Amino acid sequence: MFQSAEIGHQLSKTAYREAVPTLRAALLDAQVELFEQHKTPVVVLISGQDGAGKGETINTLYEWMDPRFISTLAFSQPSDEERERPPMWRYWRSLPPKGRVGIFAGSWYSDPIRERIEGDISVKELDARAQQINRFEEMLVDEGALVLKFWFHLTKEGQKQRLKALSSDPRTAWRVTQWNWDRLKTYDQLQDVARHLLRVTNTAAAPWVVVEGTDDRYRCMTVGQVLLKAMQNKLAAKEAPHTPMAPMVRVDLDGRNVLSALDLTLTLADKPYKDELAKWQGRLSELVRDERFKSRSLVCAFEGADAAGKGGAIRRIAAALDARQYQVTPVAAPTDEEKAQPHLWRFWRNLPRHGHVAIFDRTWYGRVLVERVEGFCSEADWLRGYSEINDFEHELIDAGVIVVKFWLQISQAEQLKRFKEREQVEFKRFKITQEDWRNREKWHDYQQAICDMVERTSTGEARWTLVEANDKNFARVKILRTLCERLEAVLQDQPNPEREAAVKSDKAKVKKAKKQSESHKPKAASAKIQA
C-alpha cells in the first residue's frame, strides 16, 4: 500500500507559493460554510512514521485555516484515568461537534500498532481490533461525520535523514529524542504491521490517503487539497434517502412475546420485603467494597414503561452504596451540545472509573424505543442502532465493566392507577406530564419496540433482566438480588488480592515456625567414638 508513496514526490517553492493563497482562501470559505450549516463534523487523522512531518503539517493547517473552528487532539500513553475505562473512551470524549474540525495526532490506530510490534497481541487479535475500528468509523460516517485518514510514509533511509536534519537544527532538535531513534530500529516491523492494518481498515466509508513525507511542501499541499475537496463534496452533497440497514424483526402471530409471558401478579408482602431488602442491600454493600471490585466497574441500565418504578428501584440501590462511589445519570432529551455529537457520545462520557458505579435512569436504548416510536430519527438510524449498541456494550465488557440491564414492565391498568395517584399527591405531581398521557396511546407500538430491543440486544454478558413491576416490593427485591448475583458471578472468577496476600502470609508464618522448631531440636549424638 506504500508503493505509490515511494516515487520521490516534490513541489517547487515557486509552485507552492503560487498555490497556497488560493488554497487558503478556499479552505476558509469551506470552513465557514461548514460551521454555519452545523451538520457535519470533520475528523482528520494524521498518522505515520516518526519524522514524517505530522506536527509540521498540523501547524500548517492551523496557519491556513481559522483556528477558532479547529481542535487538535494529541494522544500518547493513556493516563491512569483513561486506563480505568474502555480504550475508546478517550477518543469518544474528544470527537469534534458538528461544524468543527478535529485533528487527531495519534488515534485509535496507535495502540493496536504498538501492541502488535511489541508482541502483546496476535495477528488475529489485531484483525479483531481492526474490525472494531471499522464499525466505529462507519458509525461516525452514518452519523454525518467526514472522516479523513492520512498516513505519512518515509523510506527507512528517508526517516533516518529526517531525524538527523531535525536533530541538527536548534529550532527542531527538541522534537527528536532517544525514543525516536529507538523506534527507527523497529522500522521494518512497523511497515509490516501498518501495511496490514491499513489494508484491512481501508474502507469505502473511511479510506486511507498515503502521502510521501519527504518533501514538506508536497506533503502539506496534498493534505490541504484532499481536505478541501472532501469538505466541498460534503457540503455540496444532498442527503440521500436512508434505506434500512437490517431486516425487520418477525411479527408475533400468536400474540405471545417476552413481555406477555411475564407474570405481573407476582407480589411480596411488606414483612418479607423488609427482610429481603435489608439482606440484599447489605450484600450489595459488601460486594462493591470487595477488593476484587477495585479493578472493575459497574454500569446499571434502567429502562421501563412510564411510572414503572425505576426511580424507587434506583434509590434502593443507592441506599446500599457510598455516595462517593456512584453516580446516577438521568437521561432526557439531548441538549444542543449532545445533538452536535454521535448518539452514544453522551453515554461514553459518563462511564465510571474502576471501583465505581454508574446508574443510568433511561439509557442509550432511547434510539430504538422513543426515537423509533415517535419518529425522532429515520428508520435506518434506529435499525443500525441495535448493532451500534451491541458494539458499545461489548467494548465495555471487554474492558472489564460489569453491565446489568433492567426492563421494568407493568400493565396498562397499573400504569393508569399510578398516573392518577401522581396527579393527586402533591409531591408526585412533577412526575406526570401530558407527554406521559400521550405515550399511553402508543402503548402497543412501544411494546413491539421493546420486544425487538430485547431480542436484538440481549447478548452474552449484557443480557436483559425483565422485571415484573406491578408490585413495587417484588420488583425492588428482584433487581437487588439480580445485581448481587451478577456481581458475585463475575467477582468469584477474579483473583482476590487480599485473600492471596493472607494465604501467602499464613504460609510464610508456617514456614518460619517450622524453621524455628527445627533449630531448637537437640542435635543427634555422634556415633563416631573419639580415639
Image: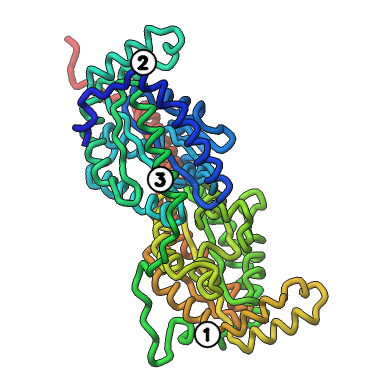
The first of marks 2 and 1 along the sequence is 2
> Residue 469, image x and y in percent?
58, 79
Mark 3 neighbour density, 10 Å: few (under 14) some (14–19) many (20 or more): many
Task: Provide the residue designation for mark 3.
Answer: 147
User: As displayed, is residue 168 above or below residue 25?
Assistant: above
Residue at 52%, 72% in the rendered image: 369
- Could you give the CA–CA distance between mark 2 and mark 1, rounded to whole angstroms? 66 Å
Task: Provide the residue designation for mark 2.
Answer: 178
Q: Nearer the viewer, residue 222 or 70?
A: 222
Name the element at disc 2: helix
Name the element at disc 3: strand
> Residue 216, image x and y in percent?
36, 21
Q: Kindly identify the amino acid type of the residue bearing the numbered disc 1.
A: His
Q: Kindly identify the amino acid type of the residue bearing the numbered disc 3.
A: Val
Q: Nearer the viewer, residue 130 or 278?
A: 130
Residue at 42%, 11% in the rendered image: 173
> Residue 172, image x and y in percent?
43, 13
Using the rendered image of the protein, determine whether residue 492 is visible from the camera's viewpoint: no
Q: Give the color scheme: rainbow, by chain, secondary structure or one colour.
A: rainbow
Compared across the picture, whether 404 is left or right of 133 comes to right
Name the element at disc 1: helix
User: As displayed, is residue 435 above or below residue 168?
Assistant: below
Q: Nearer the viewer, residue 412 or 202?
A: 202
Considering the image in quadrants, where does the N terminus appear? top left
Task: Provide the residue designation for mark 1.
Answer: 444
- Could you give the CA–CA distance between mark 2 and mark 3, rounded to whole angstroms? 33 Å
Q: Kindly identify the amino acid type of the residue bearing the numbered disc 2.
A: Gln
- Could you give the CA–CA distance between mark 3 and mark 1, rounded to whole angstroms? 40 Å
Q: Nearer the viewer, mark 3 or mark 1?
A: 3
> Residue 347, image x and y in percent?
54, 55
Residue at 59%, 57% in the rendered image: 285
